[in-house]
Image (tube, rainbow, N blue to C red):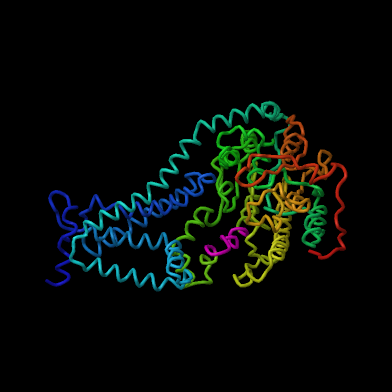
Amino acid sequence: MNNEARIDQPDVADTHLLPAEHSAGLWRISTLAFHPFLFAAASVFRLYASNLHELYFSDVATALAAALAAALVFFLAFGAALKHLGAKAAILASAVLVVGLFYSEIVDAANRYLGLGLSPVGALPIILAIMAIIAVAVAWARIDFTPANVVLNGIAFVLFIFPAWQVASHEWSAGGGSRVIAKAFDESAQEATDASLVADPTRAKNTPDIYYFIFDRYGSQSTLAEYFGFDNGDLIDFLEAKGFYVASDSHANYLKTAHSLASTFNMGYLDFLREDPRSKIGDWHPIFDMLRDHRVGRFLKSNEYDFIQIGAWWGPTQYNPSADENYSYGFGEFEHRYLRKTIIPAVLNAVAPASTYAKRLQWDIGQCQRVPRQIEKVKEIGDRSEATFVFAHILVPHDPYVFAPDGRCLSFEEHERRTKRDGYVEQVRYANSLIKDFVSALLAKEGPQPIIIIQADEGPFPDRYRHSNRSWHEATLDELRMKMGILNAYYFPDGNYRDLDQHITSVNTFRILFNKYFGTKLERLPDRIFAFPDYSNVYDFYDITDVVGGTWGAPRKIQPRAGPQKN
């Protein structure tokens, strides 16, 4: 029998999987060959389960849908090639999916247990050759594939069920009841705030647009001078010449972005989060929930502002369900981490190592494409006539250090040659060029001038704490000062800054703004600085205000501008 005649017939291994009438043709589907879809789902759920404390299901939904779609495409494609959607098609689809979606784990295992020492690109031709041999062997074999199909179903089920059970258990134990408890404590702690958060109708009419920028890990002027030998006087001069008030001795309220933004947007401190049961297991969702629905956003929307969020790759700011519009360019954090585990980066590096997508997956996280587009979107929004609140989270000078001061995107070799210190300073220079660009553009618009606030959420990481879970109880005074000192600058159209001072922290940002422009009666909170021990105890706050800031009203001396470098 010739080969074409042979593969047109139902395969011996597939006859038990056919419908009762044993109808021939392409669309005879095996109801038991579900392992391709389980392997695809398992590849997503395994990464999801290892990051349950920081992810929502919505963060993984795109990757899950794409993986399942790939499973369907390969199953149908092999079924079409074999003229039968049976066990052979499913086995071939699973082989491709396992290699494609678990590629980095396969290469790591081969290197570990076989001592091969192969790079992902170096392993590619070997693995593809093995795959080709398997494909030919399965396609042409005249054996019963029922046992293989059953075994693969079992393996795929086990691989999927364990992370799926972890996800389900976590959602059950840290689900709706905890959120209700957290909300109750929050409302109790902030009852006075909410009672005072009422706009005066006579003052809330025709209020300016509000632009709130977070430049992640942008240190204060003294931080840059003392710890990086960099004089930031040029930017300070520029902002002050434009009418900004620059708080010269401002500090972050908390060590990390999530805490700082949650505190800022809810205009209060986070002590109440200790009462949330999820805090006992180090779950970040109590904080992330506060970023998805916060007092600042609700208040401005109730006063007929359009709320626009321009996010980064970091999940909590990439998308906000409460915003009227969301803009985020490129992969999200989960998608990036998931794709890096697949065969895609190795293929891209083999065939097009200098391509945008190869760089995006391997080392720059899409920053070279994202950041300029964020700034252009800000300037575009400035042309709107509606009252608008824009929150933009700009991940510079945050690593990866991929930018030259003029905004040119570095090659990987250039990136690797720079020290962390030089990379940080160069991205401060680039951040300064961005700030000058959008400030000039926004203030040049016709009509009423906007409110512009430019802050950092935290300062740069000291070397000992970079990619480390070292306890902050061990931090030196210099390490704490480096981490907590931030850029903090305000532009009010009327130029009246009597309610600001050089020590103001971001927890009071919107309290002062809303009192000034909306006639609310919010009290200014004490400006305090809090740390937590480590990433396993992110709610065990302790006050370091007196350690970091000294006595308020006695600012630390800033290095003279004739110092080391000029921006």
| Quadrant in which residue 131 is drawn | bottom left
**For residue 338, above or below residue 161:** below
Q: Say whether residue 364 is magenta.
A: yes
Residue 421 at x, y = what percent?
Answer: 71, 63
Residue 286 at x, y = what percent?
Answer: 58, 38
- For this rendering, which residue is in front, 474 or 65? 474
Observer able to see residue 407? yes
Q: Is residue 18 left or right of residue 163?
A: left
Q: Say whether residue 209 is magenta.
A: no
Q: How many marks?
A: 0
- For this rendering, which residue is in front, 494 or 421? 421
Observer able to see residue 323? no
| Quadrant in which residue 303 is drawn | top right
Q: Which residues are magenta?
A: 360-372
- For this rendering, which residue is in front, 45 or 475? 475
Residue 465 at x, y = what percent?
Answer: 67, 55
Residue 529 at x, y = what percent?
Answer: 74, 42
Q: Quadrant of the N terminus?
A: bottom left
For the point 14% across and 72% down, which residue is it?
2
Most prominent secondary structure in the magenta stretch? helix
**For residue 153, above or below residue 401:** above
**For residue 346, above or below residue 209:** below
Q: Quadrant of the C terminus?
A: bottom right
**For residue 403, above or below residue 298:** below
